[in-house]
Image (tube, rainbow, N blue to C red):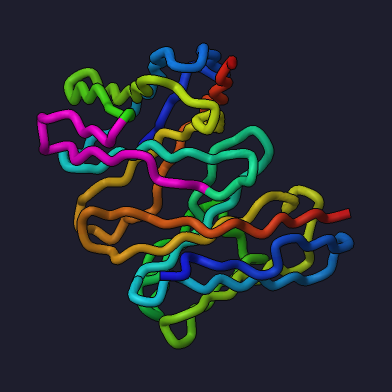
Amino acid sequence: DTGVSQDPRHKITKRGQNVTFRCDPISEHNRLYWYRQTLGQGPEFLTYFQNEAQLEKSRLLSDRFSAERPKGSFSTLEIQRTEQGDSAMYLCASSLGAPPRKQYFGPGTRLTVT
Amino acid sequence: AQTVTQSQPEMSVQEAETVTLSCTYDTSESDYYLFWYKQPPSRQMILVIRQEAYKQQNATENRFSVNFQKAAKSFSLKISDSQLGDAAMYFCAYVPNSGGGADGLTFGKGTHLIIQP
């Protein structure tokens, strides 16, 4: 069990650019989640996958955001035409899905939009 | 929509003392899970303790225990014998066990716990 990994750990981009983040879950976990955390706030749920199927999307996931998990293993989160309001920590988590429903988090990708 | 409220932005406790962090939540579901997560300054979230709503017995994990009051929709975390390594942001989180596919955690805003040596 190597834990959830995320890449890159930090990303600085200019407004209007596209960015893509990657998340590698714990290998036997079939569910993968994306959250966004702004400074001083708790994480906010964005979306989750069970295997390659995207089962839930929150209202926070605007049409500039797209997430994929093509082979049911790693996932990517792309933000198109970044805005300064997108600056946040993007957290990935994974779980077995069944009870006890524990989600294990990665270290996050900190995005700064200038 | 479910909400989770942590009314204490910051708490301070002397090393070796006991501290209780508060959490209340609002839901119309009867079956759900509640969690406390710890986020140290390095920022990686760590699961501290978990409670299943249909279990009346309060969960305990070593120095960490919860007081789960389902009717009051309250879920507090007690840390006994506080240690310097307990200093972190603590988040309360909720997820329904509805079987309807909803599986994203709803988090509170967090409580910053300071341990005084």
> In what quadrant of the picture does the C terminus of chain A appear?
bottom right
Span of residues in magenta: B45-62
Tally of numbered discs: 0
Quarter of the figure with residue A19: bottom right
Answer with left or right where residue B54 lies relative to residue B40. left
Q: What residue occupies the far bottom of the structure in this picture?
A: A71
- Residue A40 seen anywhere in this rendered image of the structure: yes
Residue at screen point 53% across, 59% down: A106
Q: Residue at x 86, y 60 (%)?
A: A15
Identify the image quadrant of residue B9.
top right
Residue B51 position in % (x across, y down): 23, 38
- In the depicted structure, whether residue B12 falls above or below residue A74: above
Say if the magenta span includes residue A60.
Answer: no
At horizontal 85% and vertical 63% (from top left) the residue drawn is A13
Residue B19's x, y, as percent?
Answer: 41, 15
Q: Is residue A113 above or below residue B77?
A: below
- Measured as percent of width and height from the top left, residue A79 is found at 69, 67
Q: Residue at x 61, y 57 (%)?
A: A108
Was residue B57 drawn as part of the magenta stretch in this picture?
Answer: yes
**Camera-nearest residue between A90 and A108:** A108
Quadrant, the N terminus of chain A: bottom left
User: Is A16 situated above or below B18?
Assistant: below
Determine the image quadrant of residue B62.
top left
Residue B64 at what x, y percent from top left? 32, 29
Nearest the viewer among B3 and A94 is A94
Regarding residue B1, the answer to whether it shows in the image is no
